[in-house]
Image (cartoon, rainbow, N blue to C red):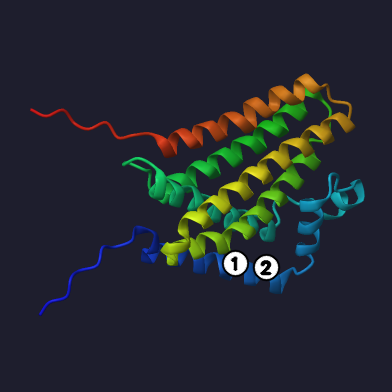
């Protein structure tokens, strides 16, 4: 007597396991090679200002450990958005790698825009600190999201609560990033209207585009 085939769960696909294992391997490598990075990560996550001395000592956007943390954060965040789209979104949710590449493009565009704005204004205005602390805050969020998306993938009965937990964490981190960015700008003498325009153009608009990408519906082909 043949058994009844079980419905496959796309969230537990083999490639997802590969993503999780790759993230854990990167974190283990960073922990062995640069354990002091976790101290800076904690400071960036829980302090409103990182401090000029720390910035002089730690800022290196080409640091391989920082790039590794960014990769893990982007992988975890993209996984959360993809899982939410698969769980609650309409048919036609984009593939995980589409979401991953979209997040990479948004992060790169934000970094370029921050640097360009500072160059045009011929003043840093806290841009370097905002970029670096924002990057570390994003990395901290990604590390927090990694166990959430891993559990959501393999424990379907916990999935709704885990996905909502991940979304709440992401929303709180994003709100904190905006508040801290405004705090830094005001502390450097940047007018509030410029801060608001930047947040709308470089922070809120990309977020709206990602949400639109996840929620877009495939238009069915007309019947002949």
Counting from the top left corner in percent of width and height, residue 127 is at: 78, 35
Residues 87 and 42: in front is: 87
10 Å neighbourhood of mark 2: few (<14), some, or many (≥20)? some
Q: Relative to 21, is 126 on the left or the right?
A: right
Residue most extreme to the right: 53
Element under label 2?
Answer: helix
130 lies above or below 80: above
Q: Position of residue 202 (x, y in %)?
A: 64, 30
Which residue is pictured at 56% across the width and 33% down the height?
206
For the residues marked 1 and 2, what is the alpha-carbon distance in whole angstroms?
6 Å
Q: Determine which of the numbered discs, if any, sits on residue 26 in the image.
A: 1
Q: Is residue 106 visible?
A: yes
Residue sitting at 28 percent across and 63 percent down? 8
Is residue 68 visible to us here? no
* Mark 1 surroundings: few (<14), some (14-19) or many (≥20) residues within 10 A: some
Classify 102 as above or below 64. Answer: above
Q: Residue 103 vs residue 87: left or right? A: right
Q: Residue at x 70, y 71 (%)?
A: 31
Q: From the viewer's perspective, is 185 left or right of 11?
A: right
Q: Are marks 1 and 2 in contact (CB under 8 Å)?
A: yes
Q: Residue at x 45, y 33 (%)?
A: 212
Per the image, label 1 sits on a secondary structure element best described as: helix
Looking at the image, which residue sits at the far bottom?
A: 1
**x%, y% of residue 182?**
79, 32
- Checking the image for residue 30, the label placed there is 2
Q: Against 187, is 192 above or below?
A: above
Q: Tag count in the figure? A: 2
């Amino acid at each position: 007597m043949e058994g009844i085939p079980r419905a496959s769960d796309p969230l537990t696909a083999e490639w997802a396991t590969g993503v999780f294992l790759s993230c854990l391997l990167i974190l283990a490598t960073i922990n062995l090679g640069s354990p002091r990075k976790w101290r800076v990560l904690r400071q960036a996550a829980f302090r409103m200002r990182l401090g000029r001395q720390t910035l002089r000592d730690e800022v290196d956007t080409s640091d391989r450990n920082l790039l590794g943390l960014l990769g893990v954060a982007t992988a975890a965040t993209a996984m959360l958005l993809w899982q939410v789209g698969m769980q609650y979104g309409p048919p036609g949710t984009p593939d995980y790698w589409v979401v991953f590449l979209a997040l990479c493009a948004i992060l790169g565009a934000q970094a370029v825009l921050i640097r360009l704005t500072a160059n045009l204004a011929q003043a840093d205005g806290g841009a370097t600190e905002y970029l670096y602390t924002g990057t570390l805050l994003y990395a901290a969020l990604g590390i927090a999201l990694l166990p959430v998306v891993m559990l959501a993938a393999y424990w379907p009965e916990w999935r709704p609560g885990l996905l909502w937990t991940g979304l709440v964490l992401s929303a709180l981190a994003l709100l904190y990033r905006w508040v801290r960015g405004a705090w830094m700008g005001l502390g450097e003498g940047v007018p509030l209207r410029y801060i608001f325009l930047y947040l709308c153009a470089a922070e809120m608009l990309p977020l709206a585009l990602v949400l639109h990408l996840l929620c877009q519906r495939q238009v069915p082909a007309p019947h002949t």
